[in-house]
Image (cartoon, rainbow, N blue to C red):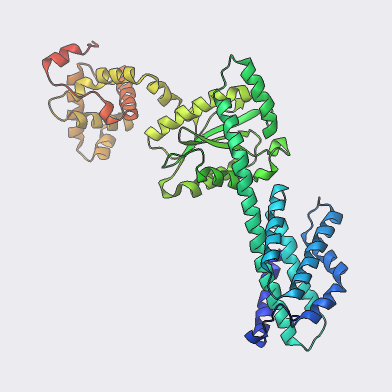
Amino acid sequence: MSLVLLRANKTTMQQLRPSYPARMRQSHRSPPLYAGLIEALRQELEPIVAEIVRDVASPDEDLEALAVSTRAAVESTIAALLRTEELTPDELTRLRLAGSRAAREGEPLQRLLDRYLTSGWVLWAAASRPPTGDSAALAALGTALLKAGDSAAGALAEGYGQAEREIAARTGAARREFLDELLELAPDDPAAAARITRRAAHFGLTPGDRYRVLVAGIDRELEDEAPEVLRVTLALDRPGRSGRDGAASPPIIATTRGRLVLLARSSWPGVGALDAVLDDLAGPEGWLAVEAPLAAGLARVAPAFGAAFGALLVAERLGLRGHRTADDLLLERALLADEGLLRAAIDRELGPILDAPRNGEELLRTVGAYVAARQNLRAAARALGVGVRTVSYRLARVEQLLGRPLAGDEVLRLTTSLFARRLLDDDALPTPQHSGEADRSRPSRQ
């Protein structure tokens, strides 16, 4: 709210600015043109502080403590404006330190900025309320308040952001170490489990709670110290507030095997913001995130991670994007559990068609369209852009190559084989053979 009011008053101040010539910029040795106005404001300090407190206070805030900090901010602003029309480097340094301190104490940046910016427009309103004939002094004060507000906001935000980055970097290493140990936790290692339990308390985690485990990938591999990790951490929660409230404890975010890993309580409220953060992180190439079923306790986090990571690899292979669950890809993971066996099965089921003297791939495409069209010849023909007779001829040729009618279980087996083939890279498929020896070596399924 204070930012809106500040901008509204800025228009009024700018209207007076032409009467404030550039030559009136004062040196540090002489008092500024508006010194009398500022001195008058000192006499109204208590009502000014009370008005600021009413504007910026939140329902659960300690009003007495807020009044003390607000009075200090107002007195500091008045003292600075009396010395010079612009904040000095020392004063900006002090504001940067105030921003840093607020970040380390977990105070929201917006509340900190409100306290300083609201001080500016309340001081301006108090100064311009009594009628005065000195428009040049009033304009000079308005200009000084605008400059001080802009400089103060910039210095506070700079100090706050720097502290956040330092906190994230310092806690990030500990979080990554904890997460690495957690993901490698063996189910039959009670000593390691006890150590995990002790360390979990430092991150606001309870061993018996339920946890979200999510693995995300973008178009590039991520390293432990990647700036993307810091960006996600800062976007999802303020690191300075970690552990204050178990339900609101921020997630543990780290990288493993080039992907982003997120561990959070099931009640963590920030999960809805994750997609937007990944959108910003990945850019036009898109992103892929796979979430495991909720882990019942820290001891189940490692298996949950394994499920999510395995599903992510499959989803990447299929070119999927967006937010997925590991259970969405159970069938694909089962088929790919033994790729050698899957290749052999595909070779056996589709080999007679692939080994056709001509158009083996076209025949397989026709079978796929026929199955997708629920075995409707006309719909398959439309999908392929050919005539119904062409589809009928190709299917008859497939039956001839297989030596069996294309119906019943045969359709199911071919459908499964075509689906499995899509899971594998084309380069990984067996090269079709055309020799009689190759035909004899393939097991028959009569």
Position of 67 with respect to 150 (left or right) is: right
- Residue 412 image point, x, y percent: 33, 21
Query: For the point 16% across and 30% down, which residue is it?
Result: 359
| Front residue of this view, candidates 46 and 295 | 46
- Name the quarter where the C terminus is drawn: top left
- Residue 344 image point, x, y percent: 28, 17
Q: Quadrant of residue 342?
A: top left
Relative to 336, say whether 377 is above or below: below
Q: Quadrant of residue 350?
A: top left
Q: Is residue 209 visible?
A: no
Q: Is residue 38 visible?
A: yes
- Residue 319 image point, x, y percent: 38, 37
Query: For the point 42% across and 33% down, which residue is it?
Result: 315
Position of 311 with respect to 139 (left or right) is: left
Query: For the point 83% across and 69% down, which residue is it?
Result: 48
Relative to 174, say whether 29 is above or below: below
Residue at the bottom extreme, as displayed: 133
